[in-house]
Image (spheres, rainbow, N blue to C red):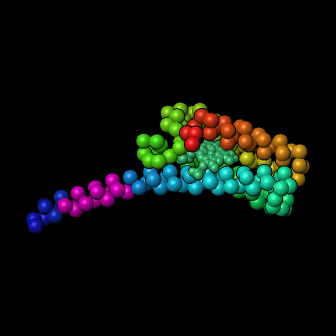
């Protein structure tokens, strides 16, 4: 094999590797987003159960509310380019990337409302906690899912 030919072979192999990585990167991005959202859902459910006195222990409430507030911040990195419906199996709608300014607003509401819930939990004020759970559900989860998530 000539040197030139070796060069092309190596270059072609490198390109193949790069494209394989790119294809996997979007799958990984989608898997990351779903994992974050599962954790969001799990913590939110746990918060509701504790707040209603149905299960769990009140002393653990702030663990879940702090986790949720942290996950809301992590969610801001969970919607990279090339992780939409054209790129893999996802319930995320293309509107997220078509209208980034609108999407950013609901993302900021998610961060702000979960932060308020974390503060309410620290105060221990049950009425405030209950009201803020409602606000998170309405202004974050529902607001975003209604517009940006495919119904199952
Ligand atoms: C800023 C937008 C946004 C907010 C806010 C948001 N979600 Fe989501 N959620 C999504 C999108 C988009 C998906 C679909 C993810 C995918 O399939 O790639 C999703 C998926 C989910 C899933 C399914 C995860 C899976 O694949 O199994 C659950 C559960 C969930 N969200 C719960 C919640 C809860 C509870 C809240 C509020 C505390 C919330 N989400 C807030 C956008 C959001």
User: Residue placed at 79% from the left, 57% from the top?
Assistant: 62
Q: Residue furthest left?
A: 2
Specify the quadrant that holds the C terminus: top right
Percent across and percent down for residue 143 are 66, 36
Specify the quadrant that holds the N terminus: bottom left
Stretch of the chain drawn in magenta: 9-21
Q: Is residue 52 magenta?
A: no
User: Residue placed at 62% from the left, 54% from the top?
Assistant: 38
- Res. 122 in view: no
Percent across and percent down for residue 44 are 72, 51
Classify 50 as above or below 98. Answer: below
Q: Nearer the viewer, residue 75 or 136?
A: 136
User: Residue placed at 81% from the left, 61% from the top?
Assistant: 56
Determine which quarter of the picture holds residue 42: bottom right
User: Disc count in the image?
Assistant: 0
In this rendering, position of residue 76 left or right of residue 19: right
User: Residue placed at 13% from the left, 61% from the top?
Assistant: 5
Q: Is residue 12 magenta?
A: yes
Q: Nearer the viewer, residue 28 or 88?
A: 88
Chief SS of the magenta region: helix
In this rendering, position of residue 114 left or right of residue 52: left
- Res. 51 in view: yes
Percent across and percent down for residue 77 are 56, 49
Q: Residue furthest bottom?
A: 1
Determine which quarter of the picture holds residue 104: top right
Percent across and percent down for residue 53 are 86, 55
């Amino acid at each position: 094999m000539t040197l030139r030919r070796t060069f092309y072979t190596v270059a072609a192999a490198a390109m193949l590797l790069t494209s394989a990585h790119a294809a996997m990167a979007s799958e990984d991005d989608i898997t990351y987003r779903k994992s974050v959202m599962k954790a969001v859902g799990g913590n939110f459910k746990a918060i509701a159960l504790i707040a209603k006195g149905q299960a769990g222990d009140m002393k653990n409430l702030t663990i879940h509310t702090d986790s949720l507030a942290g996950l809301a911040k992590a969610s801001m990195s969970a919607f990279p380019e090339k992780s939409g419906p054209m790129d893999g199996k996802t319930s995320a709608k293309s509107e997220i990337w078509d209208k980034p300014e609108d999407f950013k607003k609901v993302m900021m509401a998610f961060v702000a409302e979960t932060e308020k819930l974390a503060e309410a939990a620290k105060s221990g004020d049950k009425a405030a906690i209950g009201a803020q759970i409602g606000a998170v559900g309405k202004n974050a989860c529902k607001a975003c899912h209604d517009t940006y998530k495919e119904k199952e």
